Image: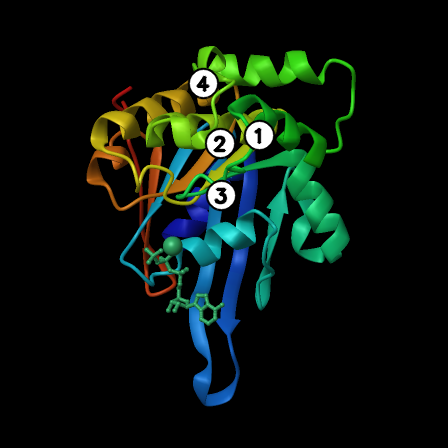
Amino acid sequence: MPAWEERHKAASGEAILSATGVKRIFGKGNAAVTALADIHLAIPAGTMVALKGRSGSGKTTLLNILSALDEPTEGKVIFRGREITKLSVAERNALRRREIGLVFQSFGLVPLMSAYENVEFGLRIAGRMGKDNRQIAEWALERVGMRGRMNHRPTELSGGEQQRVAIARAIVHEPELLIADEPTAELDSRMGLQVMRVFRDLVQSGTTVVLTTHDPGIMELVDHVIALEDGQIASYTTNEAPLA
Ligand SMILES: Nc1ncnc2c1ncn2[C@@H]1O[C@H](COP(=O)(O)OP(=O)(O)OP(=O)(O)O)[C@@H](O)[C@H]1O
Ligand SMILES: [Mg+2]
């Protein structure tokens, strides 16, 4: 049995997310690019997993498929027991908005909105219109240590603070899965560490975090590291005692 299959089996009892035989080809004919060749993985619930690999190795392509933003050419992805690769575009959008949180390298906050308004907006996108939205948004900002600055606009905040607001927006609807594409790439190491501490707190309270990174320091802070090479998994390592 190949090593990935053993891992897959070992983890699948508690896997929140798994991919089987995932392939992604962009374009057709001579111009076709195989971004992902044959990906098998299982993400254990309540852990933090980093995808690493050279530029062009397929990290973003894989994250986009795991978060139902994109569909594989072949293969399937199962999230919380449900095959998401079988869903319609509308169903995938709804699933992503309600059950997954997304964080981007460049934060993606709305510049004219305050930190609070950005987070509250995230709640509305998830379909929550309740009277207690204010309280919920403030609580999410509290969790990332940004409640005290919530009336500031993104331009009035440091990069690390903006990313923490973006995380608050991504977790305000309490998703079980948080997916982050190079969330610390635009931050200096101190701010990157603050963001990683927020992720660690979220994992401690049961959230699963999957992120990509080029930073070897970040790889020591996660539970599992999956290395991609040319669209394939080259290695899967576990940190028994990740630095907190
Ligand atoms: N929409 C697209 N159309 C054609 N090719 C694409 C598309 N998106 C990605 N690719 C190709 O797929 C491969 C994997 O790209 P991907 O963006 O997943 O890499 P990455 O590991 O995230 O790189 P980086 O570290 O630079 O972000 C690359 O060869 C890329 O050029
Ligand atoms: Mg990328």
The residue mark sitting in front, 4 or 1, is 1
Determine the secondary structure under disc 1.
helix
Determine the secondary structure under disc 2.
helix
**C-alpha span from label 1 to label 3:** 32 Å
The residue mark sitting in front, 2 or 1, is 1
> Dots 2 and 1: beta carbons under 8 Å?
yes
Give the labeled residue for mark 4: 144
For marks 3 and 4, the one nearer the N-term is 3
Q: Is residue 162 left or right of residue 67?
A: left
Q: Residue 197 lies in what quarter of the image? A: top left
**C-alpha span from label 4 to label 2:** 10 Å
**C-alpha span from label 2 to label 1:** 8 Å
Q: Residue 201 lies in what quarter of the image? A: top left
Is the residue at mark 2 in contact range of ligand 2, meaning its CB lies under 8 Å from it? no
For marks 3 and 2, the one nearer the N-term is 3
Residue type at numbered disc 3: Ala
Q: Residue sitting at 47 percent across and 48 percent down?
A: 41
Give the labeled residue for mark 2: 166
**C-alpha span from label 3 to label 2:** 26 Å
Q: In which quarter of the image is the N terminus?
A: bottom left
Residue type at numbered disc 1: Asn
Relative to 70, say whether 93 is above or below. above
Residue type at numbered disc 4: Val
> Dots 4 and 1: beta carbons under 8 Å?
no
